Image (cartoon, rainbow, N blue to C red):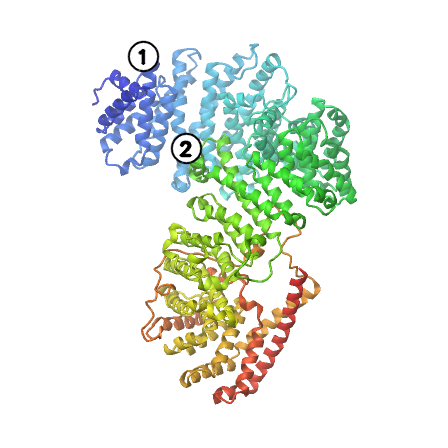
Amino acid sequence: MTSLASEELTAIFTATLSADKVVRNQAESTLTDLSADPNFVPHLIKFSCHDLHNAGVAAQNAQHAAAIRVRNVLSNSNWNDNQYFTEEVKVAVRECIVPLQCSSHVPDAVRRQLLAATQDIISYDYPDRWPTLMLQPMTILQGCINILSSGGDSPSTPLYTTAVTQLRAVLGVFLACCKHHDNPINVDAEAVDGFADVAVPLFTPLVELLGRLWTQETFGQSQGSDACTFEISPQHTVLSECLHIVFKCLYTLTSSRWPRFLCKIPEMERFCRICVVQPLGAVHDTLLPLYRQRMSIGIDDIDGREGELFAETNESPVWRFLKWLMKLSLQLVQDLMFPKRCETRVRNAAKYFCSHILPCIVQQSFQLVRWHATPRHVTSKAYIIGLEIITAAVEHRATYSDIVAPNTEELLTQLLFPRFAFSLADEELWSANPVEYVRRQADPAGDLYSARIVSANLMLALTASTHSFSDTTTMAHFMQFILQQLSTYSSGAACGDAAATRVVDASLFAIFQFAGVLDVAEFGSDKIEWLLMEYVVPATTYPAGVLRARGVLVLSAYSRKVKWSSPQAYQRVVGAVLPLLQDADVPVRIQACTVLAPLICHPSALEVVTPCIAEVIQHYFTAMRVMDNESVVRTLRKTIAYYRGTLSQWALELVDMLVQCFEGLYGRTASTEHADAVLDSLDAEAGKKRSKAFSLSEGDVTDTIMAADEVLDTLITVVRSLPQEQGTSTVVDPASNLLLRIQHRIAPILYSVLAQESGSSFGFMDAALMLLTTTLSKSTSISPGTWTLLLCLHRLISLGSADYFSQMLPPLDNFVCVAPQLFLSTPMSELCEVPTFAAGFAHLTPAQVVSVMCDAVLSGGSDLRLCELAAVPKIYDSLLQNLWAVKRKEECASRVSVANGLAQYVTQTAVRVLGDEMCRKKPRSAFVVLFVNSIFSAILADTELTVSSLHSAGALTPLIENYIGLVRRKEVSNMLRSYDRRLFVLAVTSLTEIALTLDSQLSACVGELLCGIFQSSVLMDYSVAESTMIMQEVEKRKSGEIDEDEWSDGFDDDDDDSALVCGEDEEDDDESDVSEEGYGDSDNSSNDGSPLQKDEHLKSLLMAAAAARGDAVGDDGEDDDDAHLFDEGDFVSPIDVCNPWMLLLDAVNHIVSSDQAPNPLFQTMKNSAVQQQLLRIHKVSDMMVELMALREASTRKG
């Protein structure tokens, strides 16, 4: 194996690169056979580093392929976990991989592959299994230093060239070691400090040596008159690459924590002098003058615009070195500028830095920024970082006063202001990608190295600083300068002059940046209005499209910040902007569409916009057809929300267009050509591996997803704009019912989201559930297609989407509230066409389907949090209370007989859950109350059966007694909702109503239970709490503080749809079997009709309540999970429309007036203390009557 000749390996790897598939496969097969011997790996390393540069391009390509194979093998996984690699092989690899890749003849492409493999081996073995790692590169490094520092060889000799090349290679290994230590999770602080103690003293003299050689080489070329090029000489380029890597190492060493070695003043002084001050000085004294001379000779200024040389500087090794020099300087400034904020061991070094080094860095940054402005604008990453250094220095009192403040005027007017103008890069983007151009005007994401953005940040730091030492007149002076520029150049821009256009564009950009801070300089609203009317509004008609786009952006930014002098003034602004929706330039139309909402959603704009609102909406849709842009759709949504009164007449047409738009977006999102890009864009780790350059293809996919989600939100807004349908009917003419027709249109897109896994993957699930909730909340009937969505929700739970059960509570509750009879008694097969995936549930009613979903959630057991289980009793309450409401209507009671087993099923489930081991070990009061509420709801829905079952198990009285004890705890009482109190009162009412209708034994038990309830203070406590709440709401309603309108008057970026959520809270899991009756597992039922007769779980329930009561001693509050279980607005309940206190009084009066009442109960009712409670209840009942009347009046008014 090891004797395999280089020629043979060259032939094999050359064959792997062949275009002939057969040849390629044969070569791969040969390599697979050779790889069976692990010793083949070190042999490949040696082959890839063998000197074959005279053998031709094919041989070098073969070596590159071999290096790639080495990297793939070594990087595939930790070789210590792979039996393929023997200890002998690992030793051989560790001994050869560093020295060989540092050989001067090894091509860069091969070296990069081997260096990547070395980085992985370091992570596997260093330092425990590879303690000698540092000896190898240090030996090579010392040899290189000896040659370079001897002075006997000129830069052109082979020995010198070999030494520099080897130095560059070995520095790559050092950088890999530095990266290994820049990991606080895997490497402890002591090890990092120990490595820095060795590395920093090693790199500091190396920087001094390389800096001297680099400066000499720069001086040697300074007499040339070459045209502008950033390459000075091959030797200078290699030296720049070495310095680039060294500074990258230093940056890495100091990034996580300031090294212990540099906390001492002498070491700090030497480090800063050699690694910061001297390089910055050398660049300023030698390199920048040479570049300025060459640019003056070789390149003419192209219209004064920046950006032409950014690509050149970005690719130049010299500028990469300058970038990392400036990055290290910026890191020093950010970490050490405020010694009091540093850790204790660093403070003395930080004080020295602030006194001696910081002024030098800021001064050199100023010089660098000035160089980039003359003789022409040049942009580099070093320049960007120089601006960031100055921006940071503004925060430092001494540096600001001594250096920044004296140069502020120059900075703002000469160095920064010209950078605000339209650039060549903007011009390219304007034509090639208008959507991206518009996005970058307000959101610089993906445009990190933009001279304009960084200059704007510095401008704001200088003009809007709130520090006591800052010059407060800077803003006023700069605004005066901007006004002078506008006054001077606006006429030229109006005639299309290019230079004037650039100045006006820069002025408008600065004004846009000041949108949030002009009030700091007391630049009053009247002045801002004058500025907008005098200069910005006219710009919307200028010949240059960039000014029209910038103008509408500025007007939108200020539209809600200015107190306009008159509606007519604002209408002039709107009138100037509306024509831009039809502008000839695509970016202008897009810009207008994305920012129009703040302008036209204003009271003063109604007169101008309302007559043409249909045309405005049509322009939005036109823009949406040609691009996938979230901002345009958001503007459409906000416009619909504001003009809902006018647009609601076209609701069906709007829904049709939005549905078509979503179908197109969703189709493009889910298409096969986008699938891989979508998964990558949603995967954080994959994102880290992608190129740092902005990817338009991936950006397009993300834009499509965001736009589709915004379309769903817009559909929600359209539905919200519709009036609430009145009444409830089971038979409705679809042709005459608007909401039913809307349901018919949106059901297919909701099905596409809810019935497919990709709906969740793309992030559409939340919006889809909200749209379903909103549509149902407005409706009085349900279409067949919408009923199908209920089966989709069940499928999601059965497939494991447990985290969505809490979001499903609102639509599930709306299903049962809109059509309670159908929901409780009609099989799914009669309501809709049952999809294939739900064929087994065709015979079940919707209530039974939901019960199966609840069973699936509860089957999660200890794997679920309490908040995830809490959604189950809330949906139980909704089912049972709607059953109770239907039964109260005599004509409907017989239609829901199929649901008679629901109360028994819920009671069994509640007791089983409360008796679960998890609940017994760590009871939670709110959790217990929620499931006891479900038992109270069961008492409402089927009083006699529920009471009989509980009594036969001996559980009825202990249940109520322990509940009363639980809710009398102060912390629990404070958590209770009005809903919890009213539900208990209704349960007591139901018990009172049947007290005289039961058999003697059960009647006596119920009578004893009622005596205990009335003799306790729970009803008094509840009545006091309710009266306080009612009084507050009555006062607010009478004073007009409560607004029934669900639409916010504000203009936020995102509308608050929470008012539509009829429910909220937690989640779910697996699916359980359906019993014969369709209400879950019936194993707890006994043949004698007493389902709880042998149930031991009830004792656990009582123990849980007692334990929760006992835990209150010495405990200040509930667990964090428990505190989130209650929510006053979980769902709209049928009990909200009745007066429970009046019903209770009626039931009590019936008992008192009956001669059949058990004597103890009768005597209790006559007790003076109970009479006082009843008087209090009577008062609360009267207050409730007044409140319900006010609510009804508000509803009718709305």
Q: Secondary structure at mark 2?
A: helix
- Residue positioned 50% across, 38% down in the render: 702
Q: Nearer the viewer, residue 448 or 842?
A: 842
Indicate left or right for 66 with 1031 as reference. Answer: left
> The residue under label 2 is which amino acid type?
Cys
Give above or below for 576 relative to 985.
above
Q: Identify the residue under disc 1.
A: 55
- Residue positioned 29% across, 25% down in the render: 96
Which is in the foreground here, disc 1 or disc 2? 1
Q: Secondary structure at mark 1?
A: loop
Q: Mark 1 Cα within 10 Å, few/some/many (few <14, many 20+)? A: few
Residue 640 visible somewhere in the drawing = yes
Where is residue 1108? Give x, y as percent: 43, 69
Give above or below for 424 relative to 900.
above
Give above or below for 987 relative to 1192.
below
Q: Identify the residue under disc 2.
A: 178
Q: Nearer the viewer, residue 787 or 529?
A: 787
Where is residue 111? Give x, y as percent: 37, 23
Total count of labels: 2
Q: Quadrant of the C terminus?
A: bottom right
Q: In the rendered image, which quarter is residue 373 located in? A: top right
Indicate left or right for 1013 with 107 as reference. Answer: right
Give above or below for 277 relative to 1012.
above
Residue 469 visible somewhere in the drawing = no
Q: Nearer the viewer, residue 891 or 279?
A: 891
- Looking at marks 1 and 2 on the same chain, the residue that comes earlier in the sequence is marked by 1
Where is residue 833? Give x, y as percent: 43, 52
Q: Which mark is residue 905?
A: none
Q: Mark 2 Cα within 10 Å, few/some/many (few <14, many 20+)? A: many
- Residue positioned 50% across, 33% down in the render: 268
Tell me the distance, in whole angstroms, between the alpha carbons under discs 1 and 2: 36 Å
